[in-house]
């Protein structure tokens, strides 16, 4: 073990949020050391493209060229993640045995896939997708797979189902719950989305639990409570759990994510922040502290923490938004909907377009759209500004039309 060196900001995690912290610090003129401890061997990259197509060869998903880090004096230590923290001494211990000192530590460790705990889940031909290396493994398997079973009808499962279908495989999605996408999309939109996937050729079995995965030496079938399905490839996406173990072991407050305040500082240690998938933060649009898994959240939280370290005092209030490309379906969500909100589904100007407006106490709080990027952008503009839009304002019209006609209440004033 070597003695502690460096100080300034140490970021643990070289993903979307960690990159956002390091790059924004330099963009803000922060001139103390910036060190990124990254567990993966790859420089920071985007994960969304990994599930939108089959990858078999070199994948260009890195966020910036490696020269970016050199030019900005960002010390990116690939393959040398943190294995322990010592908050009292303000040091992080890395896998290689180096102790790194910090003035401020930012945890940006992301999430890991929830494991599929059934017999046979370790058979060859059974995969989950999180990293670039996973994407290459699945992409290669897809080139020969004929019967693909996707376990989990969430965003990543549905995206992969459509990728497999486009590659010519027979595809079945198994979902334990009675509907797709859990509570992530409204109950009103879910049947429409399901119908589009079924129309394209995906077989969807909801309310179906996987009992075991079976095969001689590799996957051959998936056994469910309703019978067995042939499978030469199984991919599962049944949710993610935050990588908060470093924080927990270091005695920081953790509850399904590192607990942070409205400025994303650990609630127990002012020298530590957490951002992205691993952070649970109070958000003015949510009921209680939330943990969000999206690019928007990772980028915006990283930016906020970097600006805070560089002197800004703003709390984190950015509008959550999200997208998922599932074959010919582009799903986009702006705002945070709660289960008791009133949802109104409105057809768009073409058969493929659709919007679901969610109202709370008669006021618009979230918008889900299918294949309608312009309405999604209008929703983001309206909700981020806090422009009040009532059920009556949106009767028989769209947000875009309201904005264009200058008929939103804000514009009317
Ligand atoms: C396949 C896939 C598709 C997605 N598609 C979309 C999409 O379409 N739209 C969208 O908005 N979001 C999407 N997401 C979610 C989005 O990518 C994440 O929310 C975002 O990457 C979170 O950023 P992060 O930095 O918090 O975590 P990550 O990007 O996961 O980065 C965390 C990094 O920290 C590293 N790490 C963990 N522990 C340590 C340690 N102890 N020391 C050092 N490093 C460590 C991890 O190895 C990882 O590299 C997708 C995610 C996946 C997996």
Image (spheres, helix red, strand yellow):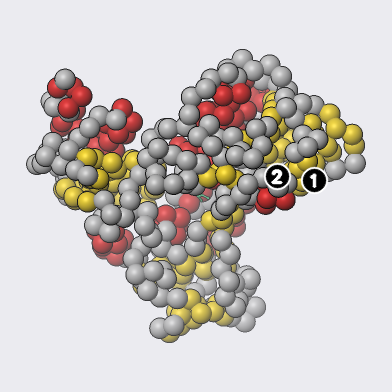
SS label for mark 1: loop
Counting from the top left corner in percent of width and height, residue 121 is at 59, 72
Task: Using residue 339 as the reference point, say whether residue 112 is left or right of it.
Answer: right
Q: Which quadrant would the N terminus be assigned to in this image?
A: top right
Give the residue drawn at x 71%, y 37%: 37
Q: Give the CA separation, mark 2 to mark 1.
A: 9 Å
Percent position (x, y) of residue 49? 48, 45
The residue carrying mark 1 is: 95
Image quarter of residue 102 = top right
Q: Residue at x 52, y 28 (%)?
A: 304
Describe the element under mark 2 as helix, strand or loop. loop
User: Assess mark 1: CB under 8 A from ligand 1?
Assistant: yes
The answer as to whether callout 2 falls within 8 Å of ligand 1 is: yes
Q: Is residue 382 left or right of residue 241?
A: left
Within the image, what quadrant is residue 285 found in? top left
Q: Nearer the viewer, residue 190 or 282?
A: 282
Per the rendering, the mark at residue 187 is none
Q: Which mark is first along the chain, 1 or 2?
A: 2
For image coordinates 38% across by 60% down, the residue present is 182
Few, some or many residues within 10 Å of mark 2 (<14, 14–19, 20+): many
Q: Quadrant of ligand 1?
A: top right
Q: Nearer the viewer, residue 288 or 400?
A: 288
Where residue 312 sits: x, y (%)? 53, 20
- Judge whether 405 appears above or below 333 on screen: above
Q: Give the residue at mark 2.
A: 39
Quick check: 100 left or right of 321?
right
Q: Is residue 103 visible?
A: yes
Lateral position of residue 191 relative to residue 31, left or right = left
| CB-based contact (under 8 Å), mark 2 and mark 1 | yes
Q: Position of residue 82 (x, y in %)?
A: 74, 43
Out of 267 and 13, give the one closest to the viewer: 267
Q: Is residue 43 visible?
A: no
């Amino acid at each position: 073990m070597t003695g502690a060196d460096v100080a300034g900001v140490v970021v643990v995690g070289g993903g979307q949020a960690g990159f956002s912290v390091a790059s924004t610090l330099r963009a803000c003129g922060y001139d103390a050391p910036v060190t990124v401890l990254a567990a993966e061997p790859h420089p920071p990259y985007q994960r969304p493209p990994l599930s939108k197509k089959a990858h078999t060869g070199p994948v260009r998903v890195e966020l910036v060229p490696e020269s970016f880090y050199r030019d900005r004096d960002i010390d990116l230590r690939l393959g040398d993640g943190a294995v322990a923290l010592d908050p009292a001494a303000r040091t992080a211990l890395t896998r290689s045995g180096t102790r790194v000192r910090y003035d401020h530590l930012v945890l940006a460790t992301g999430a890991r896939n929830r494991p599929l705990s059934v017999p046979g889940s370790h058979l060859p031909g059974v995969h989950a997708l999180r990293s670039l290396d996973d994407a290459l493994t699945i992409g290669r398997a897809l080139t020969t797979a004929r019967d693909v079973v996707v376990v989990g009808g969430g965003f990543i499962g549905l995206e992969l189902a459509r990728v497999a279908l486009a590659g010519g495989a027979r595809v079945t999605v198994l979902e334990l719950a009675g509907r797709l996408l859990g509570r992530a999309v409204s109950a009103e939109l879910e049947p429409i989305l399901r119908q589009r996937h079924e129309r394209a050729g995906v077989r969807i079995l909801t309310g179906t639990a996987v009992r075991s995965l079976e095969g001689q030496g590799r996957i051959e079938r998936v056994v469910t409570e309703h019978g067995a399905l042939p499978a030469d490839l199984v991919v599962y996406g049944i949710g993610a759990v935050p990588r908060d173990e470093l924080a927990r072991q270091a005695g920081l407050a953790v509850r399904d994510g590192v607990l942070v305040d409205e400025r994303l500082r650990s609630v127990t240690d002012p020298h530590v922040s957490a951002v992205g998938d691993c952070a649970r933060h109070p958000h003015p649009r949510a009921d209680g502290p939330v943990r969000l898994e999206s690019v928007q959240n990772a980028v915006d939280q990283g930016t906020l923490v970097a600006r805070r370290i560089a002197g800004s005092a703003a709390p984190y209030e950015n509008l959550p938004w999200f997208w998922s490309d599932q074959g010919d379906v582009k799903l986009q969500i702006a705002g945070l909907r709660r289960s008791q909100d009133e949802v109104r589904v409105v057809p768009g100007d073409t058969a493929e377009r659709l919007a679901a407006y969610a109202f709370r106490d008669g006021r618009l709080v979230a918008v889900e759209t299918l294949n309608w990027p312009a309405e999604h952008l209008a929703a983001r503009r309206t909700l981020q500004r806090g422009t009040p839009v009532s059920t009556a304002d949106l009767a028989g019209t769209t947000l875009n039309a309201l904005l264009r006609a200058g008929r939103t209440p804000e514009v009317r004033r």
